[in-house]
Amino acid sequence: MSNSYFNRDQAEMISYQYQSLVGKPYSYDKYNAGVIECVAVVPFDNLNKWFFIYLYEENDDPETALSFYESEQFDVILISRINGEITFIDIRTYMAAHHIKADALNFPTPVPAWKNDHRYAGAY
């Protein structure tokens, strides 16, 4: 996971831009073969990301699964089911693993997570 998050608009733009990944291989590892079923905007922090996955597993709807989240820090993940189990990877890690240059992604500049940390107030 990257240590920089996206705001809601940025995350939605990236998710929309990469919907073409749905149906593509999640992994080229023959033991973890699966296809991407969803490119989703999710909470940035891991605890809320896992709660999102729990809700997504219940209803297969990323918008409903995200409805509990009120923060302004987001990420984009790719979701797959491998042997019936949901697995996910953030889009930047997926792109790096598949040797796609980040500058080719036209990602907006993410906001460094430390910028909202009160301990660094005035540092930027």
Image: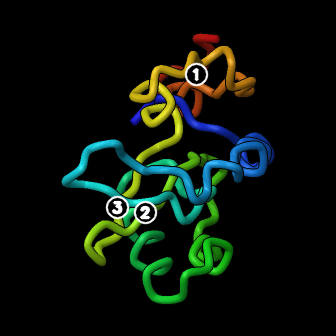
Q: Which residue is mark 2?
A: 80
Residue at left offset 57%, top offset 59%: 23
Q: Which residue is mark 1?
A: 121
Q: Is residue 118 visible?
A: no
Residue 16 lies, with reference to residue 35, above or below; the image says above
Marks 2 and 1, how far apart at CA: 39 Å
Residue 96 lies, with reference to residue 9, above or below; the image says above
Q: Which residue is mark 3?
A: 87
Kindly check if marks 2 and 1 are in contact, taking CB atoms under 8 A apart as contact: no
What secondary structure is marked by label 3? Answer: strand
Residue at left offset 68%, top offset 73%: 63
Q: Is residue 124 left or right of residue 42?
A: right
Q: Is residue 30 left or right of residue 66?
A: left
The tag earlier along the polypeptide, 2 or 1, is 2
Marks 1 and 3, how far apart at CA: 36 Å
The part of the image, by quadrant, that contains residue 5 is top right
The tag earlier along the polypeptide, 3 or 2, is 2
Kindly check if marks 3 and 2 are in contact, taking CB atoms under 8 A apart as contact: yes
What secondary structure is marked by label 1? Answer: loop
Q: Nearer the viewer, residue 72 or 109?
A: 109
Residue at left offset 61%, top offset 57%: 22
Identify which amino acid the numbered label 3 is placed on. Answer: Thr
Q: Is residue 4 visible?
A: yes
Q: Nearer the viewer, residue 37 or 116?
A: 37
Q: Pointer 1: residues within 10 angstroms few (<14), some, or many (20+)?
A: few
Residue 21 lies, with reference to residue 53, above or below; the image says above
Residue 49 on image: x %, y %: 43, 60
Residue at left offset 60%, top offset 48%: 74
What secondary structure is marked by label 2? Answer: strand
Identify which amino acid the numbered label 2 is placed on. Answer: Ser
The tag earlier along the polypeptide, 1 or 3, is 3
Name the front one of labels 1 and 3.
3
